[in-house]
Image: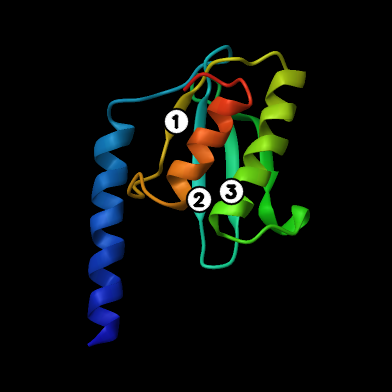
Amino acid sequence: MRANILKRKLTLRIKRKKRIRAKISGCENFPRISVFKSNRTLYIQAIDDVKSITLAAADGRKLGIKANKEGAKKIATEFAKTLKAKKIEQAVFDRNGYVYHGVIAALAESLRENGIRL
């Protein structure tokens, strides 16, 4: 029974992800910020979809950050510093099919507080 619920949740997230990605893309000066959330940690990267390259990335495992709101704020602060070093001030936020709530919302708000316009 539990496997069916998890499969359904994943299927719904993938459907949301495809619907979102059909509408947004990033370029060198205006990258797409993609978030992946596992049960243990967060991963975030800035992607140039025109050239298909990753401009910047942050890994929660390397920073010792857990997948909670406090961890999201810390990783967003570090990621914003990396983006500013590369002179990126604006971006498109790709929540990757996750509901804009909790950890994902805290991550986006922290990016905005650190000077990245989403």
Q: Which residue is mark 2?
A: 36
- Please tell me whether mark 3 sits on a helix, a strand or a loop: helix
Three-letter amino acid code at the position of disc 3: Ala
Q: What is the number of callouts on the image?
A: 3
Point 27% across, 65% down: residue: 9
Instruction: Report whether residue 60 is seen.
Output: yes
**On-image quarter of the N terminus:** bottom left
Pick the residue in front: 73 or 19: 73
Q: CA distance from mark 2 to mark 3?
A: 11 Å
Of mark 2 and mark 3, the one earlier in the sequence is 2
Q: Are marks 1 and 3 in contact (CB under 8 Å)?
A: no
Point 54% across, 16% down: residue: 90
Q: Quadrant of residue 12?
A: bottom left
Instruction: Report whether residue 47 is seen.
Output: no
Of mark 1 and mark 3, the one earlier in the sequence is 3
Q: Which residue is mark 3?
A: 72
How is the rendered protein coloured?
rainbow
Pick the residue in front: 101 or 2: 101
Instruction: Say if 36 sits above or below 117 in the image.
Output: below
Tell me if 59 is positioned left or right of 36 in this view. right
Of mark 2 and mark 1, the one earlier in the sequence is 2
Label 2 neighbourhood size at 10 Å, few (<14), some (14-19), many (20+)?
Answer: some
Residue 93 is tagged as 1
- Please tell me whether mark 1 sits on a helix, a strand or a loop: strand
Tell me if 24 is positioned left or right of 115 in this view. left
Three-letter amino acid code at the position of disc 1: Phe
Q: Residue 32, how many percent across, how many down?
A: 49, 27
Point 54% across, 53% down: residue: 69
> Mark 2 or mark 3, which is nearer to you?
3
Point 25% across, 61% down: residue: 11
- Please tell me whether mark 2 sits on a helix, a strand or a loop: strand
